Image: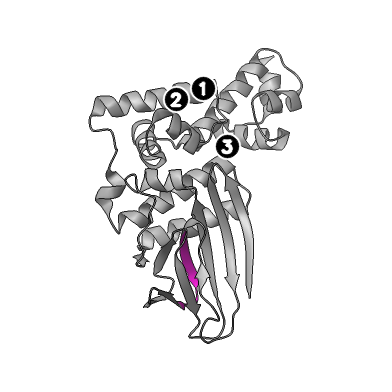
Amino acid sequence: MLKRSTLLDDAGVTLADVACRHRAGRGDAIELRTTHALVFVRRGCFVRAVHGDERLLDPTVAYATTPGLEERIDHPLQGGDDCTYLALVPELVAALWGGDPALPARPLPTSPAVDLEHRLMLAAARRGEDRHEVTERALALAAAALERHDADRVASGRPATARARRALVDEARERLLADPDQSLPELARRLAVSPHHLSRLFHALTGSTISRHRLRLRVRDALERLAGGERDLARVAAEAGFADQAHCCRAIRAELGTTPSALRAALT
């Protein structure tokens, strides 16, 4: 039997924790896949049969699914398995995969760095961290897994010159200032670039992830409101775009090393 817990469903990215507890043996039926997804095995193993090609999948590999693909899952060992399911809408898959949403059929070996980032991203999602951060990390993880299969395809569409890369990042910063709440996929779509390329270039040129930059903009907004004499911390948090006052307090303490109440006393 399968147990699935959805941890993120945002901007075309769905992240779920899937636990399978089927008994050892051959799968009962052929299953028809309906989504584009990457599946990362965390524990246990199983045999995946696609068009007669059987492959053993264990925690050293991931695999991809494409709508319309028929597969059977067999379980050679007792104890079941645990996997992380990362589904992407076709537009995001095409952006990551050189314009083609048809993902590779064979298993994708994962590096130790990918395996570690996979689990760090999963831990962040389980803690309920900022959805923009988890989405950005999920897209980076998908790109890293696909790069080991065909790095050139993942790299296609990257701005070729330093000037073009700087212009892209500057426009992203401008758009984030105008609307900090837009997601990475939405921002990339408006800039006509892959979310993966945008995220990497942004970090390379600013030293910050897009999700962290977004949070810094909110902290600066809150700081300016406090300096302007606003006394109501809940109103500051809401107007600066934080989820709630507690979120605002955590962000300000992490960014500035102090609390909103201390800032309010110091600035007014």
User: Do labels 1 and 3 touch, CB within 8 Å?
Assistant: no
Question: Which residue type does callout 3 highlight?
Answer: Ala
User: Do labels 2 and 1 touch, CB within 8 Å?
Assistant: yes
Disc 3 on helix, strand or loop? helix
Label 1 packing within 10 angstroms: few (<14), some (14-19), many (20+): some
Query: Picture quarter containing residue 145?
Result: bottom left
Label 3 packing within 10 angstroms: few (<14), some (14-19), many (20+): few
Disc 1 on helix, strand or loop? helix
**In whole angstroms, how far apart are the C-alphas of marks 3 and 2?**
21 Å
Whether residue 41 appears in magenta in the rendering, the answer is yes
Question: Which residue type does callout 1 highlight?
Answer: Leu
Q: How is the image coloured?
A: one colour
Q: What span is colored magenta in the figure?
A: 38-46
Which residue is identified by label 1?
Answer: 177
Which residue is identified by label 3?
Answer: 254
Q: Is residue 193 above or below residue 105?
A: above
Q: What residue is rendered at 68% in x and 23% in y?
A: 239
Q: Position of residue 235 (x, y in %)?
A: 74, 24
Q: Position of residue 63 (x, y in %)?
A: 41, 65
